[in-house]
Structures are given as C-alpha cells and as structure tokens.
C-alpha cells in the first residue's frame, strides 16, 4: 500500500459495483472459514485488512487473542464500534505498522490484490509476523472463475486477469490465479503447504445477490457449489494458499 492512496474512498461503493456484496458476506465468508478451519493454529490471530470486521466476526469463535490491521480510518472506526475491547485494532498501512508480537495464524483475505507491493507484504509476514509453527491463510479473487471467463466471452473484459475500472476504483492492482499467487508467495520466501479454492462460481456477485433474495438457491445447493470447488479449485470464486514461514524455519 502507498501512503498517497485514499483508502477510505477505495472502500466506498461505486456506480455498478459494490465493495462488498451480500454474496461475499453471507456465502463466501462462511465457506472461507470452513476451508480455513482445519489449518488454524491455536493462539494469537492477526488479520490484515479487516475492513469493517465482517470476516473478523466469523473468526471470533476460534480465537481469543485477535489483532486487526486496517488502512481505512472509516472502516476501522466502524469495526471498533462493533467489537469494543474484544478485538485489538491497529490503524496503519502494512508497510508502516509496527506489531509487538508474532502470530500463530495470519489471515489475508481479498486484500493482496489491492497492494502496491504484495511480495513485500508477504515477506514481512514471513520474516516478522509469523510465529514458529504459524500459518498464513491467503485468499484472493480468482482470475479463472467461470463468471470472469464468461465475462471475457461476452466482451465485458479483455482477459481473465483483467482489472476492471470498477475494481481499479476499489484499489485493485491485479487479479490472481493459483499460479501467480503461488509465484508471489514463493518470491516472498514463504513455503506453500496447501492450495485450493472456495466455491464453484459461474455467476457474477450482483447476480448471486439477486438469487439469494429468492428461494431458488437452497442451502444444499450452496454446499454443493462448495464441494464442487474442492474438486475444481481453478474454477472457484476465490483461491487460497496455506503457507508456513520459509526464511526462518524448516
């Protein structure tokens, strides 16, 4: 991230594109936690880029010691109001933040694609913030999601990894696929121990939001999309890596 950026503006909705859809909050967050839970390490949790704390709330049943770092002053004020003293919030960019501890679990969800220096942030996680035996859970939107591939065929975007104008206004710098995400993790010195995807997704977020207001999509269907995503991670809404530190550990 860069100090010259307006992080409050980047987290606002823009014409034709919300920052966070109901599909993200009600569906994807639930299934991300389901995918992540087997890899949680007990102890301290660090969430980088916590926004207003929607995903943080999903993590509170699993951790008693939670620290969140967020660059948007408006977002972190809302999160502090919601959690009080239950969660420790730090208003800072990842380049500038000074944290007193190392953490057993570090979570970075749908944030890396916003960063000006993603490899530098991953290197800080590896070098400074992961405790011995700790794990990083790193998730990003997937360039190869069927919804994006359909958009290419419709002529809405030029290629799978394109950054749309709406995404750019929200601070996106790139769109990852599994190979490029693993490339950046390796370049930062992290050791990838697991890779997969979350939720098979053929519809855009705004289409899912419309469906979720009806009874067309059942909980069983959502579970089926999650299960199918385990078979076809490259066709999921999000891709994720589980990493352990590499520069200081085996």
Image (tube, rainbow, N blue to C red):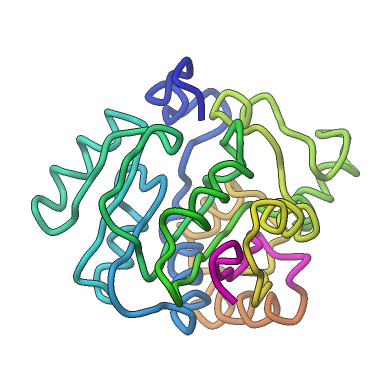
Above/below status of 106 relative to 19:
below
Question: In the depicted view, which residue is nearer to us: 165 or 88?
Answer: 88
Residue 241 is inside the magenta segment? yes
Q: Which residue does the image show at 82% across and 34% down from the upper left?
A: 157
Q: Is residue 52 above or below residue 104?
A: above
Query: Which residues are drawn in magenta?
Result: 233-250
Q: Residue furthest front?
A: 248
Q: Is residue 223 left or right of residue 60?
A: right
Residue depicted at 55% across the width and 70% down the height: 244
Q: Position of residue 239 (x, y in %)?
A: 66, 62
For this rendering, which residue is in front, 119 or 215? 119
Q: Specify the farthest residue to the top.
A: 4
Q: Position of residue 75 (x, y in %)?
A: 30, 35
Examine the rendered structure and indicate whether residue 205 appears above or below residue 232. Answer: above
Q: Nearer the viewer, residue 131 or 11?
A: 131
Residue drawn at x 53%, y 76% is 35
Q: Is residue 242 magenta?
A: yes
Quarter holding residue 172: top right
Q: Residue at x 18, y 56 (%)?
A: 87
């Amino acid at each position: 991230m860069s100090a010259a950026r307006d992080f409050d503006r980047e987290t606002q909705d823009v014409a034709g594109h919300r920052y966070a859809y109901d599909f993200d909050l009600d569906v994807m967050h639930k299934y991300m936690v389901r995918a992540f839970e087997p890899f949680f390490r007990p102890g301290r949790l660090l969430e980088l880029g916590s926004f207003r704390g929607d995903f943080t709330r999903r993590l509170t049943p699993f951790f008693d010691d939670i620290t969140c770092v967020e660059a948007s002053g408006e977002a972190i004020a809302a999160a502090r109001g919601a959690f009080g003293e239950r969660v420790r919030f730090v208003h800072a960019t990842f380049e500038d933040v000074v944290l007193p501890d190392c953490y057993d679990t570090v979570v970075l969800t749908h944030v890396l694609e916003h960063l000006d220096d993603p490899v530098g942030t991953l290197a800080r996680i590896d070098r400074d913030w992961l405790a011995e035996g700790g794990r990083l859970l790193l998730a990003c939107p997937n360039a190869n999601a069927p919804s994006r591939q359909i958009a290419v065929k419709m002529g809405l975007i030029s290629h799978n990894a394109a950054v749309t104008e709406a995404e750019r206004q929200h601070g996106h710098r790139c769109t990852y696929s599994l190979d490029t995400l693993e490339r950046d993790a390796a370049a930062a010195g992290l050791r990838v121990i697991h890779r997969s995807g979350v939720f098979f997704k053929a519809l855009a977020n705004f289409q899912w939001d419309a469906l979720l207001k009806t009874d067309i999509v059942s909980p069983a269907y959502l579970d089926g999309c999650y299960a199918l995503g385990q078979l076809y991670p490259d066709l999921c809404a999000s891709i994720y890596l589980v990493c352990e530190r590499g520069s200081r550990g085996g």
